[in-house]
Amino acid sequence: MSRRTISPKVDWRESAQQLAGSIPIGSLHPAVLAWAARRRKADVWSIAFSGGADSLALLLLLWAYWPERRARLVVLHFNHRLRGRESTAEERFCRRVCARLRLPLKVGRWAGRRNGASEAEARTARHDFFADQMKKAGSRVLWLAHQQDDIAETMLMRLARGSGLGGLAAPRPVQSPGPGRTHLRPLLTLKKAELVKGLRMAGANWREDSSNARAIHFRNRVRGRVIPAWVAAAGRDALAGAARARDLIEEDDAALEGWAGRVATGRKIAIEALEGIPRAVLRRVLHRWLLAVRPRTDLSRQGFELLLSAVERGQSTRFSLGTKDFAVIKRGELTLKNG
């Protein structure tokens, strides 16, 4: 089992200051820094902390960079209970670090865990815990430790399943997953190797998730096999290139979303308003309409494409969205009809 040796003698406050010395605050993503500069000092900041190198670096840097906010930081650790003693040791490690930094730690344990649980199930359980604890703490922001390597991994994974701009723009430095909530990822400008180097120079230890070395999950296979070969084949800083591409994709995605919002919104859409707009914008208008009317079905990708073509033609149409709901184009309007 691969893990860093954990020493109880680490002075976590000193390590935080040393890490901040080797990774200056200007190294963080500018969008996150701009967001933080506008916040009230009374706001509660929640930090996801697994005990791994990335989340440890994030925790130490936030503690060092914003000393005036330490009294308003809440650390969240979710024990998935999937790796027995290793999971328990990670929880104990997180408790020791937070105790030394004098930060409150809230721990959740996955009551519904099961062997063979998927990454998606684990992520859902983890974020449900985060959302619950944030609500209790009166916090609306969650800091997450995704870094530059994660951008390349996510991009390649989503390319494999045919994602559009919205999917390829992930992980975003500033994200609004729901009303009044914000997720921040300040480390997207830094590589994993830079964080590890900084932690070692600061004398810090961390926990390694042994399951990351196993090729069970798609992300692990991309991380362990694809990324190294891709970086070697590129002959350049491919990780920085992917990060730059992500930034540009996010800009394009925001532009198209803004255009779609100006074209049409709501439960009824005038077909006349859709004439002459690019298909990429029309696609987003239709997505927005489906979210507004919420038909009682999960429309497949193929079904969506058929509906998109029908809306694009603008002819009178009655398109089935399931057993009861229909998308209807009649008298120049797109509406939802029941039965």
Image (spheres, grey):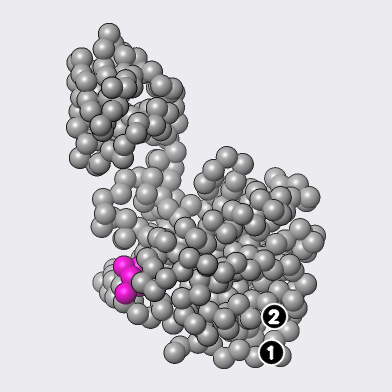
Q: Residue drawn at (73%, 84%), measured in percent from left and top?
A: 11
Quarter of the image where the C terminus is located: top left
Q: Secondary structure at mark 1?
A: loop
Q: Secondary structure at mark 2?
A: helix
Residue closest to the eye, 285 or 276? 285
Could you tell me residue 211's position as x and y percent?
Answer: 41, 79
Q: Residue drawn at (67%, 66%), measured in percent from left and top?
A: 106
The question of residue 195 being in magenta is answered with no
Q: Residue drawn at (40%, 27%), measured in percent from left and top?
A: 293
Magenta part, dominant SS: helix
Q: Which mark is residue 93?
A: none
Neighbour class for label 1 at 10 Å: few (<14), some, many (≥20)?
A: few
Is the C-beta separation of discs 2 and 1 under 8 Å?
yes
Label 2 or label 1, whichever comes before in sequence order:
1
Q: Which residue is mark 1?
A: 8
Alpha carbon separation for disc pair 2 and 1: 8 Å
Neighbour class for label 2 at 10 Å: few (<14), some, many (≥20)?
A: some
Q: Residue drawn at (65%, 91%), measured in percent from left and top?
A: 7
Residue type (three-letter) at the residue carrying disc 1: Pro
Residue type (three-letter) at the residue carrying disc 2: Arg
Quarter of the image where the N terminus is located: bottom left
* Image-quadrant location for residue 9: bottom right
Residue segment shown in magenta: 216-220
- Placement of 37 over or under 153, stated as above or below: above
Q: Which mark is residue 96?
A: 2
* Image-quadrant location for residue 15: bottom right
- Placement of 14 over or under 262, stated as above or below: below
